[in-house]
Amino acid sequence: MYLFKQKDELRHYLNTAKQQGATIGFVPTMGALHEGHLSLIRTAKAQTSLTVCSIFVNPTQFNDPADFEKYPITIEKDIQMLIAAGTDVLFLPAVAEMYPEGLSAPAPHYDFGALETVLEGAHRPGHFQGVGRIVHKLLDIVQPHKLFMGQKDLQQCLVVTRLLPLIDSPAEMVICPTLREPDGLAMSSRNMRLGPDERKNAVALYQALSYIKTGLAKGGSLPDILAAARLQLQSSKFEMDYLDVIAVKDDGIILSPEQAVTDLPMYAVVAARMKGSPVRLIDNMQM
Ligand code: AMP
């Protein structure tokens, strides 16, 4: 695996590879890697000839400074995992390499429409603008044929899908399934910050999503199912930012849709933290 820290050197290497016929698959991450990230690498390897992973904890997408400071960093282990998975290139830039203009310089504004004002957008102001800013910069450098992202961050996938035409990127978006721990908890770098009891309790998120899926499949009423699932989570000591069902359409999201619109893909989505815990967890499940 080649490791680049300078964007110009990476650009030069990838240009040469492309001239020789390589197709580039790109997996952007913030490190603290787990099997979920590696599943993206494996999918990229299966679909393209040269897999680039980036590790960059992007300061501009953290609305909560404490979350940024506490974000886990396990770079030596990450490198070993990427090598074992057969990654071709790791891009590991410093903050100044990605933001030579400085973090407080005026930033571009991306029009993500109503996608940015609901769910994660409503609870993490500025988050998706920060995601747009870093993905734009990374895509300018890597110019991949395909971009691999996880359904775990569903709204991020929708935002980036919308970003691609805004920045004239020809990259094809590939959304990969969520990998879960044996008990059902979605793998996440933030799980490392849970204490042993919190980790056991965290499965309640998956159980709430599964409960909604089963209830809807049986033809239950969405408001009743949601109310019961919210109670379930509260009794498992969770405080929710949201627990809802959404329908996804080309230009946005419908919250708590009437069951009449089930021709659109529907997902149960949740963001919550356990009482007293600073760790905010998100998950979703297709209905
Ligand atoms: P992150 O490092 O958390 O920014 O995630 C990097 C990429 O990995 C994003 O596209 C995530 O959606 C994806 N990802 C995170 N967790 C999982 C998971 N459990 N399964 C599949 N993909 C994931």
Image (cartoon, rainbow, N blue to C red):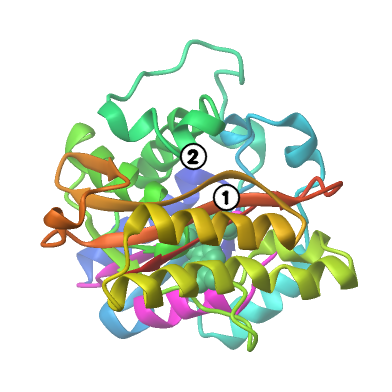
Name the secondary structure under disc 2. Answer: helix
Check if residue 27 falls in the magenta segment: yes
Would residue 282 be found to the left or right of residue 178 on screen?
Answer: right
Q: Magenta segment, which residues?
A: 21-44
Task: Classify mark 2: residues with Cα within 10 Å, few (<14), some (14-19) or many (20+).
Answer: many
Q: Nearer the viewer, residue 198 or 30?
A: 198
Q: Which residue is mark 2?
A: 120
Q: How many marks?
A: 2
Q: Nearer the viewer, residue 243 or 76?
A: 243
Write the residue at 54% across / 75% down: 36
Check disc 1 and give the amino acid type. Ala
Q: Determine contact: label 1, label 2, CB under 8 Å.
A: yes
User: Which residue is farthest top?
Assistant: 106
Q: Is residue 258 visible?
A: yes
Check if residue 42 falls in the magenta segment: yes
Write the residue at 43% across / 61% down: 225
As measured in the structure, the alpha-carbon distance from the residue carrying label 1 to the one carrying label 2 is 8 Å
Task: Classify mark 1: residues with Cα within 10 Å, few (<14), some (14-19) or many (20+).
Answer: many
Name the secondary structure under disc 1. Answer: strand
Write the residue at 55% across / 35% down: 98
> Could you tell me residue 210's position as x and y percent?
47, 75
Q: In the rendered structure, which disc, 1 or 2, sits on the residue that comes first in sequence?
A: 2
Location of residue 160 by image quarter: top left
Write the residue at 33% across / 42% down: 159
Q: Which residue is mark 1?
A: 271
> Could you tell me residue 134's position as x and y percent?
47, 38
Would residue 101 be found to the left or right of residue 33 on screen?
Answer: left
> Could you tell me residue 20's position as x and y percent?
23, 71
Check disc 2 and give the amino acid type. Glu
Location of residue 37 by image quarter: bottom right
